[in-house]
Image (cartoon, rainbow, N blue to C red):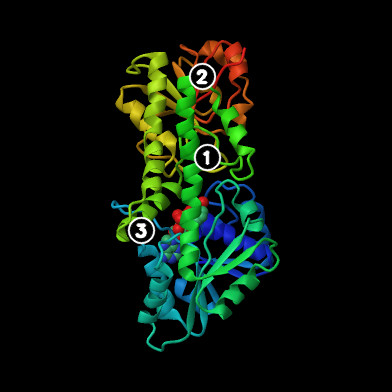
């Protein structure tokens, strides 16, 4: 497993659970040191127990020596990062680096499986990059096996996927990889390399589209006094639509949707096509923070000099990942407008302290209420929802709550004397 982040480590542990022997490779030696001593370097429920189990059984090992890992393995998974470049295209340098190292160290037939999300045509490039580095022209097959796990539920998703997609041009290599997943019961879709690559991007774009759609409907609900949660329930009960990813809120973020949509838009442009739906999906999302800030200012007036408390920094609950988190956008925008900011998150500041964020950190949720003019909820951590909101109201200077996730109990909070705003929410007396 080359790359031991959220995807690589989870996949490695899933394969160990299926009785495979796995070597995890990473260039980040600090990360490897933690892993070797039974510690997960990020927050992801359930991984630590399996790490302990498989380290002690000897089914899992870690190394920073990629060459050795390549020589000792039959199957090489690529699970490195694929960040965006400034023009929206995908930076493939980590994948290229890995492919070249594989080529330089190849000592027999290998199946190379790309799990990193990468544009259509990348697996063909990987094949070429490997061959360019190995003069003996040893046989190598490249397979695309995109990953669909959700951070926060990564282990569950890896062990119980909705489907496994295996893209390959060589049937033997495809079957070899499908056999790895034999013990997992779900549809296994065998397809071509380019199809598998495009399935991953289309899936993420479709999910982002559902969120942007309900967020746009949420704005109309605000204008007409209609409850967006009822609208979502009413449309979600239609089995052609489905109820998931129809929760209105501050918008999507995280390590995948923003960069994957940017990459897909770039692929359209490269093909001389206009990605009209995707542009609209992104535009709704890009203006959602502004929309919330207008709602805040309508209720609080000018935010200059006011104290605003941010509840939750992670881009979603059960992860410490803050890449492209809406909370970061909100913090930066409010700071620019002259607000004082406090923030609390149950895991983010423990595992990865964001540098340069203009916020005062609170060590407990209750501290966010003290002399605050507004509490802005941006991650729906369970303990926020079950907090004793009633007893803390009096500690706020202005009892305003902006619920960026439509997660709190509006009726209860209103009865406790709070002023509540959630997009498209209607108070039922
Ligand atoms: P990550 O940043 O958590 O992990 C990537 C790891 O690769 C890091 O530990 C890094 O040190 C390592 N690495 C970089 N270059 C290396 C090299 N040359 N050799 C060995 N290790 C190297 O990334 P992630 O979130 O696990 O994502 C990995 C890929 O999976 C990305 O393409 C992403 O789009 C995709 N993906 C991510 C998720 C998710 O929820 N995080 C879900 C599906 C797909």
Looking at the picture, how far across and down is residue 378, in whole percent? 49, 31
**What residue do we see at 53% from left, 59% from top?**
147
The residue most toward the bottom is 136
Label 1 and label 2: CA atoms lie apart by 28 Å
Looking at marks 3 and 2 on the same chain, the residue that comes earlier in the sequence is marked by 2
Is the CB of the residue bearing disc 2 within 8 angstroms of ligand 1? Answer: no
Q: CB atoms at circles 1 and 2 under 8 Å apart?
A: no
Q: Which of pointers 3 and 1 indicates the residue nearer the eye?
A: 3
Element at label 2? loop
Mark drawn on residue 267: 3
Looking at marks 3 and 1 on the same chain, the residue that comes earlier in the sequence is marked by 3
Residue underneath mark 1? 316
Label 3 and label 2: CA atoms lie apart by 40 Å
Of the pair 108 and 215, the residue shown nearer to us: 215
Residue 188 is drawn in which quadrant? bottom right
**What residue do we see at 55% from left, 37% from top?**
246
Q: Is residue 30 visible?
A: no
Q: Is residue 25 above or below residue 326?
A: below
**What residue do we see at 40% from left, 62% from top?**
119
For disc 2, the neighbor class at 10 Å (few under 14, some 14 to 19, many from 20) is few
Q: Is residue 71 visible?
A: yes
């Amino acid at each position: 497993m080359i790359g031991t982040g959220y995807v690589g480590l989870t996949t490695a542990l899933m394969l160990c659970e299926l009785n495979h022997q796995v070597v995890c490779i990473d260039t980040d030696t600090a990360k490897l040191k933690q892993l070797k001593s039974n510690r997960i370097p990020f927050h992801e429920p359930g991984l630590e127990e399996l790490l302990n189990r498989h380290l002690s059984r000897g089914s899992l090992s870690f190394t920073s020596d990629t060459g050795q890992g390549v020589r000792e393995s039959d199957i090489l998974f690529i699970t490195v990062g694929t960040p965006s470049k400034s023009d929206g295209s995908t930076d493939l340098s980590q994948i290229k680096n890995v492919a070249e190292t594989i080529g330089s160290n190849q000592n027999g037939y290998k199946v190379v499986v790309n799990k990193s999300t990468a544009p259509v045509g990348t697996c063909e490039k990987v094949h070429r990059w490997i061959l360019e580095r190995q003069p003996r022209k040893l046989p190598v097959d490249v397979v695309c096996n995109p990953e669909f796990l959700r951070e926060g539920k990564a282990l569950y998703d890896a062990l119980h996927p909705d489907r496994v997609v295996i893209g390959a041009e060589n049937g033997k290599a495809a079957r070899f990889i499908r056999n790895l997943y034999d013990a997992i019961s779900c549809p296994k879709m065998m397809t071509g390399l380019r199809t598998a690559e495009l399935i991953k991007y289309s899936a993420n774009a479709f999910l982002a589209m559902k969120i942007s759609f309900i967020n746009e409907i949420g704005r109309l609900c605000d204008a007409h006094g209609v409850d967006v949660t009822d609208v979502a329930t009413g449309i979600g009960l239609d089995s052609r639509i489905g109820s998931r990813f129809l929760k209105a809120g501050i918008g999507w973020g995280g390590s995948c949707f923003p960069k994957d949509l940017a990459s897909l838009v770039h692929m359209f442009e490269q093909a001389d096509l206009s990605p009209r739906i995707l542009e609209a999906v992104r535009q709704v999302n890009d203006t959602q923070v502004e929309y919330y800030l207008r709602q805040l200012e309508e209720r609080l007036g000018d935010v200059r000099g006011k104290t605003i408390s941010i509840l939750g920094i992670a881009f979603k609950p059960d992860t410490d990942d803050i890449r492209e988190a809406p909370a970061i956008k909100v913090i930066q925008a409010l700071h620019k407008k002259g607000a004082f900011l406090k923030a609390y998150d149950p895991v983010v500041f423990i595992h990865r302290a964001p540098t340069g964020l203009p916020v005062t950190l609170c060590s407990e949720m209750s501290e966010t209420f003290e002399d605050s003019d507004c509490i802005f909820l941006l991650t729906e951590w369970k303990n926020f929802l079950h907090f004793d909101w009633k007893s803390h109201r009096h500690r706020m200077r202005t009892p305003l709550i902006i619920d960026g996730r439509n997660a709190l109990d509006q009726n209860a909070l209103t009865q406790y004397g709070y002023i509540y705003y959630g997009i498209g929410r209607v108070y039922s007396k």
